[in-house]
Image (tube, helix red, strand yellow):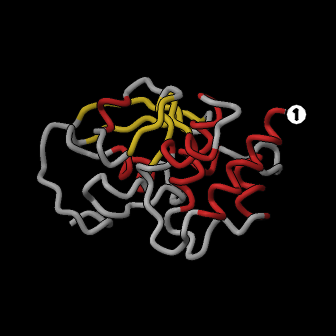
Amino acid sequence: MAKNGRSRARGNLMPVKVRINGSPYEAKVEPRLLLVDFIRDVAGLTGTHVGCDTSNCGACTVLVDGESVKSCTIFTVQADGAKVETVEGLSKDGKLHPVQKAFRENHGLQCGFCTPGMMMQASWLLREQPNPTEAEIRVGLSGNLCRCTGYVNIVKSVQQAAREMRR
């Protein structure tokens, strides 16, 4: 059993190189190793959460070469040579990213389990659409589920982050 509780058959290992939040990671991995497991178990970055194991919840959302991806839906070998951004990479030089700051200030989280994926999706959305309407925010976040909030404060958080990022 792997430390994440998933059994792993021994197979041919494949070399991969992935840059996560600007840092290089190299490893030999089984071809079926999910990117979320590489991020957590190899890179040691546990901010990316494993939620549903079915790709429905979005807790594992990261950016791969600038595109929003549920990291439980992609094998690490598919990300070979890619640049991956996780929630740990949002802040720079000890300064919170506008999305992180807005989530904190607007109480855009409760239990916090969905928050890393929600923030990564929000950061992607704001790169794609710097001035989204409330409807565009709701559609943009629709692949990320939160079981604790009514999304009102999450939407407020994204709206505030959008205003700050436009300044």
Q: Is residue 7 left or right of residue 46?
A: left
- Image quadrant of residue 89? top right
Picture coordinates of residue 121 (x, y %)? 53, 45
Residue visible at 41% across and 53% down?
Answer: 58
Picture coordinates of residue 104 (x, y %)? 74, 64
Residue visible at 28% across and 41% down?
Answer: 29
Question: Where is the N terminus found, in terms of image quarters?
Answer: bottom left
Residue visible at 60% across and 75% down?
Answer: 110
85 shown above or below 41? above
Which of 15/158 is in front? 158
Residue at which label 1 appears: 167
The number of callouts visible is 1
30 shown above or below 81? below
- Residue at the far right: name it: 167
Residue type at the position of mark 1 = Arg
Q: Is residue 72 left or right of residue 20?
A: left
Picture coordinates of residue 113 (x, y %)? 50, 68
Residue visible at 32% across and 66% down?
Answer: 3
Question: Where is the C terminus found, in terms of image quarters?
Answer: top right
Picture coordinates of residue 2 (x, y %)? 26, 63
- Residue at the far top: name it: 81
Q: Is residue 90 left or right of residue 147?
A: right
Q: Secondary structure at mark 1?
A: loop
